[in-house]
Amino acid sequence: MATYRELFEYREFRFLYGGQVLSYLGDQVAAVAVAVLVFDRTDSALLSAVAYASAWLPGVFGGPILSTYADRLPRRAVLIGCDLARAVLIALVAVPGLPLWLAIVLLYAAHLFSPPFVAARAAIMPEVLPGEAYITGNGLSNVTHQLSQLLGFVAGGLVVAAIGPVWSMLGNAATFALSAALIALGVARRPAALPDGETAGLLAQSRDGIRYILADPWLRTCLALVWIATGFSFAPEAIAYPYAESLGGGPVQAGLLLAAPSLGFLLGAIALTRVLAAGTRDRLLRPAALLSTVALAPALLGPSLPVLLFLLVLAGAGASFIVPLNAVFVRRVAPEFRGRAMGVAASGLLVCQGLGFLVAGGAVQAGLTPATVVGLSGLLGAAAVLATPFSRVPVKA
């Protein structure tokens, strides 16, 4: 199995990873800056939430269609173009005196470029990293993302407090511009994945991508396992604050409840992509998916905060099964469909997680205790995972 250090022997990966780190850092600062910018102008929590939701709503509704561009166009050009477009749009959001409605429209427009960028990056990685190095590289990308979530919001708050939301947004725009420059310098030109002479329209090609996935039983069950497990295992995030209050705590305890699964996910991703041998790792994918849900079931017993945090770390570690499974999924998909396949996978993941959040919040609002909701999420999720057919298959070349 490749080490993290060995990954950086691949020139293209060094530049792609550098751009990824820049974008992650900028996005975490921008997430705080957007909330501050909108709330300062309006004193409205609802409008702040609307602006904040711009980071994921475009992926829900436009992912499968917009990700088609990662197959229609050369992926290097998609990466550079999306980065430059986001740099310009985010910079415009920071213009002083810009009407708030226009700022929110620009935010949503900027995030429309995220699905094709993510799809193009995921599709090009198997061409940059061969064999097991790709599994390890995919793991490092996810570890980096988790670290940015664990530390980024704290650092983002400090940065926004120090330089203000406007300069923070400009800094985010600069990270996208720098990422584009790194990709332009370090990533090789490749032709578009779709064969020459392909004349079908965007929507037709998007439908072809969905049909391709549905026609492959293993791809279908792979997505079902990921969507179902994460829909249940991530649901407790939506009720972290009321759960903390029910335990006699407040914002600090809520922060711990949110951080615990991320810590577990981080540790699990390292174990599955860097420590365990490939055969052992593949055998553990389904048990890990089960752990991501069943670890929540003891919450029904009303454990203390330290025990609950331990359970959430275990659940997060189980949920990390999606990291190596994502890499297997991408390699199994034919190269000309990889962008569209990732668009479908990402959109479905966002929808299932969003539904899990809504159901958990609604259940607490209806009168169930947070402990009961988390425990039931674990039990129902475990039953759903066990009912989902899934088997190992040889990865297509």
Image (cartoon, rainbow, N blue to C red):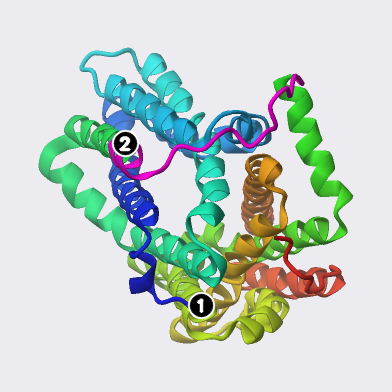
Q: Quadrant of the C terminus?
A: bottom right
| Magenta stretch encompasses residue 185 | yes
Q: Circle 2 sits in a helix, a strand or a loop, which is it?
A: helix
Give coordinates of residue 375: x percent, y percent: 67, 75
Q: Residue at x 77, y 21 (%)?
A: 200
Q: Residue at x 67, y 79 (%)?
A: 282
The reply to whether residue 301 is in sight is no
| Magenta stretch encompasses residue 219 | no
Give coordinates of residue 349: x percent, y percent: 65, 51
Numbered badge on residue 268: 1
What residue type is disc 1 on?
Gly
Give how far apart the Cα atoms at labels 1 and 2 are.
Answer: 29 Å
Other residues around mark 1 within 10 Å, as few (<14) / some (14–19) / many (≥20):
many
The residue at the far left in this view is 162
Q: Nearer the viewer, residue 294 or 176?
A: 176
Other residues around mark 2 within 10 Å, as few (<14) / some (14–19) / many (≥20):
many
Residue stretch in magenta: 180-200
Q: Residue at x 38, y 28 (%)?
A: 86
Q: Is residue 361 above or below residue 138?
A: above
Secondary structure mostly seen in the magenta stretch: loop
Q: Circle 1 sits in a helix, a strand or a loop, which is it?
A: helix
Q: Report if the CB atoms under discs 1 and 2 are less than 8 Å apart.
A: no
In terms of image quadrants, where is residue 212?
Answer: top right
